[in-house]
Image (cartoon, rainbow, N blue to C red):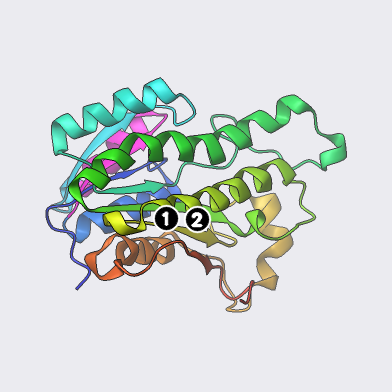
Amino acid sequence: MFGLDGRVALVTGAGQGVGAGIAAALAARGAAVAVNDLDLDRAEAIAAAIAGADGRAVPVVFDVTDHDAVVAGIAEVEAELGAIDVLVNNAGNGGAEPMHPTPFRESEPSDWRGPIDVNLYGVLHCSRTVIGGMCDRGFGRVITISSGAGLVGLRLGVAAYGAGKGGAIGFMRHLAIEHARLGVTANTIAIGLMETASSEVTAALARSVPVGRCGRPTDVAALCVYLASDEAAWMTAQTLHLDGGVVQS
């Protein structure tokens, strides 16, 4: 159950943190994994670690906010591994620049571009590049890693980030319904506070998590394995809260 033998997966932003955990878990279930990152050294290190655990992985460097780079990078992956069956849109936060929480009234328009571009346009670019082939083959899994910040208001100064994440959540629902009869599913995981989050955010909220701890990459990876599998064929257009019980729905 939940085997991914013969599947090809692309995980964006997989050179560290949650993305690295997702890539390792998909490979452990049998998928050949393309490890995307902006930094070649990080991508190569994760791909090497997967290979060292008897998995198959290749590094691929491109910026998800650059449509032409996405198209070229995915063509490179497919030439080496085969057609992409599973896309995990994990690249996020503020993009190439670190995200600095700032009250919206104190922010500048130039501060909004990074979070919107990577969290929304990055998802659009990658999804658009693979969706046609998935439909032609009658199988596809698109999984977007979003955030509770895209669903509820927070006092952390992450309004633009929330806008990008919220936009991606809405997009994924449309993507799912448009392609639901073509063998392609599209789901979103809205993750809560992670151990990999910045310390200034973590310190403010860690005690509010009902299960008593922050999330770990393995928590997210396990759900991605299910959503990528054949067994998840009837799960689509959903936003799944993975946050230790912070949001109840």
Q: Residues within 10 Å of mark 2 (few under 14, many from 20)?
A: some
- Circle 2 SS class: helix
Q: Amino acid at mark 2?
A: Arg
For image coordinates 77% across by 46% down, the residue present is: 157
Image location of residue 225, percent across then percent down: 30, 63
Q: Can you identify the residue that label 1 sits on?
A: 176
Q: Quadrant of the N terminus?
A: bottom left
For image coordinates 82% across by 43% down, the residue present is: 103
Q: Is residue 212 visible?
A: yes
Nearest to the observer: residue 125 or residue 210: 125
**Magenta run includes residue 41:** yes
Q: Is residue 40 left or right of residue 231?
A: right
Q: Is residue 102 left or right of residue 139?
A: right
Magenta-drawn segment:
31-50
Residue found at the very far right of the displayed protein: 105
Q: Which of the numbered marks, if any, corresponds to residue 173?
A: 2
For image coordinates 40% across by 53% down, the residue present is: 143
Q: Is residue 211 left or right of residue 155?
A: left
**Magenta run includes residue 241:** no
Q: Is residue 98 visible?
A: no
Q: CA distance from mark 2 to mark 1?
A: 5 Å
Image location of residue 248, percent across then percent down: 63, 77
Nearest to the observer: residue 165 or residue 22: 165
Image location of residue 113, percent across then percent down: 65, 29
Q: Amino acid at mark 1?
A: Ala
Q: Is residue 39 left or right of residue 229?
A: right
Q: Which of the numbered marks, if any, corresponds to residue 235?
A: none
Nearest to the observer: residue 12 or residue 217: 12
